Image: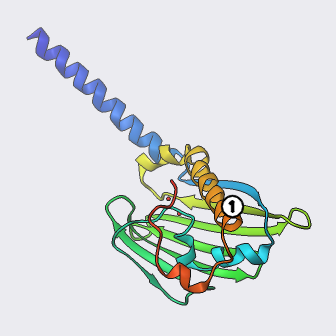
Amino acid sequence: MKGIRVAGIILGVMALLLIGLLVLGFLLPSGWSVERSTTVEAQSEEIFPLLSSARAWTLWTPSPETGFEYFGPHEGEGSGRSWDDDLYGEGTFVITAVDSPREVRYEVEVEGGSIRIAGHMTLGPADDRRTRVTWREDGDFGWNPLLGYLARRMEDLQGSQLEQSLEALNRLVTEREPLDADEADEPSTGSPGSS
């Protein structure tokens, strides 16, 4: 009888802890912001084509390996891709504004908009031969109490992903000939590290 009573108390305490964690998750901010920069040994005109085309993003950012397709124009506003992949879930990426060769803005929606990201990349002169590329993302996980905990770690998690992608962009720009528009038609699934 005493053992049943102790087990009931333990279960009650565990239930209270779980409810407390869920309530705290609802109270945590669901939004996050991350910014990273790098300097590329190239002019902004050489880098910009890799930013202004959803197809070109597959050359330097991690991408789903299955269930994705491109839509809209090849480059510029409206250029996008959608996916439905076991690892990445279901989502869309679309370029929403371009200011050649200085800025690209985009939006990402995952799982029907339950996760939203607004991002932009800016290019500015670092000196006569190099360009400073700055990448910022602002995201929101919505009302999911479990993702409230994740939002607190996005500076490290997503920040690391942005750093890896910027390194890949830098290598791509400095180690190859200028991008031919047709080269970005086929995705590269060997991209490092995920937007």
Above or below 192: residue 185 = below
| Residue 116 visible in the current orientation | yes
Q: Label 1 neighbourhood size at 10 Å, few (<14), some (14-19), many (20+)?
A: some
Q: Position of residue 150 (x, y in %)?
A: 49, 46
Above or below 195: residue 21 = above
How many callouts does the rendering have? 1
Q: Position of residue 189 (x, y in %)?
A: 44, 65
Above or below 78: residue 148 = above
Q: Nearer the viewer, residue 74 or 18?
A: 74
Q: Which residue: 42% across, 48% down?
A: 145
Q: Quadrant of the N terminus?
A: top left
Label 1: which secondary element: helix
- Residue furthest bottom as drawn: 73
Q: Position of residue 8 (x, y in %)?
A: 18, 22
Q: Nearer the viewer, residue 81 or 106?
A: 81
Q: Which residue: 11% across, 16% down?
A: 4
* Residue 124 lies in quadrant: bottom right
Q: Nearer the viewer, residue 169 or 27?
A: 169
Q: Which residue is mark 1?
A: 170
